[in-house]
Amino acid sequence: MNKLQHTHVLSARLKAQAGATGRGLLASIGELLEERTNQQVTLGEITGELLLSSRTLRSRLLELSTRFRTLVAEVGANQVRRYLTETSWPLDRIPEQVGYSDAANLRQAVKRWTRESPQDFCSRLRTLRST
């Protein structure tokens, strides 16, 4: 772990402990997931970083009406949207950046999130930006 990653981990731990429920906890988990963009992240890894037990994290997330798996999916979806809208990369380059096994799986996920193909999604956003 390099110095910058170590700083992020410490920051996330402090936020999680200070705001152990609510936005502080969700922000901390989001930061840790963002750092591991193209990796499969487990609940155990996150709880270890936040110095919380798995049971405690699960119950706090339940209090917030969410689950770890849901947060992982949301962070991944946001990363994909960013790559699709802020880069000119071809679709087959993005999966390796966000942890998908191939472009076909990524296409299916984008269609599930947006109800449109990745190409249509990008075109619509570009049109909205130009108006």
Image (cartoon, helix red, strand yellow):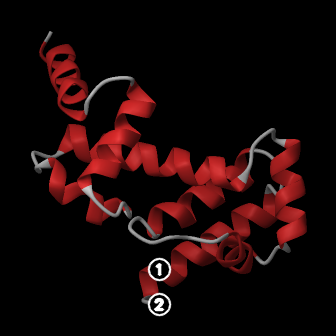
Measuring 74% from the left and 73% from the top, which residue is drawn there? 47
Query: SS for tag 1?
Result: helix
Number of other residues with Cα within 10 Å of mark 1, as a class: few under 14, some 14 to 19, many 20 or more: few
Left or right? Give the position of 19 relative to 32.
Answer: right
Residue 126 visible to an observer of this rendering: yes
* Residue 120 location (% of width, % of height): 20, 24
Q: Where does residue 6 sit, x and y in percent of width and height?
A: 53, 83
Q: Quadrant of residue 64?
A: top right
Q: Quadrant of residue 123?
A: top left
Question: What type is the residue that disc 1 sits on?
Answer: Gln
- In this orientation, which residue lies closer to the viewer: 105 or 32? 105
Residue 1 is tagged as 2
Q: Position of residue 48 (x, y in %)?
A: 72, 80
Residue 16 lies left or right of residue 30; in this view the side is right
* Image quadrant where residue 122 sits: top left
Asked whether, in this view, residue 50 is left or right of residue 116, the answer is: right
Disc 2 element = loop
Which amino acid type is shown beneath numbered disc 2?
Met
Q: Are marks 2 and 1 in contact (CB under 8 Å)?
A: yes
- Mark number for residue 5? 1
Return the x and y of residue 107 as percentages of the image width and height. Answer: 29, 42
Q: Is residue 51 above or below residue 93?
A: below
In the image, what residue occupies the spot 44% across and 87% down? 3
Farthest residue to the top: give it: 131
| Picture layout, residue 74 above or below residue 99 | above
Name above or below for residue 68 compared with residue 10. Answer: above
- Residue drawn at x 11%, y 49% as measured from the top left: 90
In the rendered image, which quarter contains the C terminus?
top left
